[in-house]
Image (cartoon, rainbow, N blue to C red):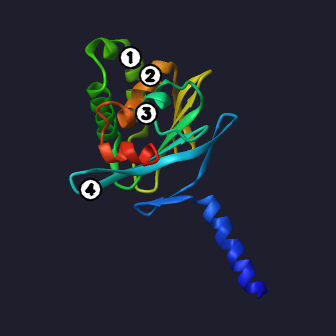
Amino acid sequence: MKKSMMMVCVLLLSWNACALEVAGVKLSDTAQVGSANLQLNGAGIRSRLFFKIYVGALYLPQKQASAEVIIADEREHRVALHIVRELSSEKLLNAFNEAIAANHTKEELAALDGQLKQMAQIFNEVKEVKPGDVVALDYMPASGTQISVNGIARGTIAGTEFNRALLRIWLGGKPVQDDLKKAMLGG
């Protein structure tokens, strides 16, 4: 009897620590960004052709199903990319830039030029990401978007509009993948 109760407790505790599994990637149901405790809003797989690229997870202060509300919100949040396929930083950066360009006018892109160059510099220093790596894009209103790889901060890019441009990659009117958008919105 004691053994059965212990197994039930272990299962319940492990379920709380890992709320969701997507494409073999176990995701935590919470994240800490600055002093904010965030919860997993949703997650899905980014694929291209037949290849799985990464699992994208969105963490927010509270669950939210509206992309517009999330993009407009200025509180802490995280987009975590759990890499499942090796990528050069150049390929990852090109994918980000294409998705940002698809969701912005030429004038908006021109206004983001300095920040996009900073992002390129950060990605160029990373060189590549491999299966098991986690790229975290943490937004903290006072400082901007911190880009980390495997928990190591690689740089911070100031500006609310830059962070909104990043969010539009997954949540914008022309998201990188429709079913990933739906999954990150908790659908």
Quarter of the rendering occupied by the N terminus: bottom right
Q: How many labels does the image show?
A: 4
In the picture shown, does residue 160 fall above or below 173? above
Instruction: Place residue 39 in its image quadrant.
Output: top right
Residue drawn at x 64%, y 72% as measured from the top left: 11
Residue at mark 3: 67
Label 4 SS? strand
Residue at mark 1: 112
Residue at mark 2: 162
Labels 4 and 3: the sequence-earlier one: 4
Label 1 SS? loop
At label 3, which amino acid type do we have? Ala
At label 1, which amino acid type do we have? Leu
Instruction: Place residue 13 in its image quadrant.
Output: bottom right
The Cα–Cα distance between marks 3 and 1, rounded to whole angstroms, is 21 Å
Label 3 crowd (10 A; few <14 / some 14-19 / many >=20): some
> Residue 132: image x %, image y %?
46, 56
Label 2 SS? helix
At label 2, which amino acid type do we have? Phe
Q: Do the residues labelled 1 and 2 touch (CB within 8 Å)?
A: yes
Labels 1 and 2: the sequence-earlier one: 1
The Cα–Cα distance between marks 2 and 3, rounded to whole angstroms, is 16 Å
Q: Which of 4 and 149 is in front in this view?
A: 4
Label 2 crowd (10 A; few <14 / some 14-19 / many >=20): many
Q: Nearer the viewer, residue 156 or 176?
A: 176
Label 1 crowd (10 A; few <14 / some 14-19 / many >=20): some
Residue at far bottom of view? 1
Labels 2 and 3: the sequence-earlier one: 3
The Cα–Cα distance between marks 4 and 3, rounded to whole angstroms, is 26 Å
Q: Which of 177 and 26 is in front in this view?
A: 177
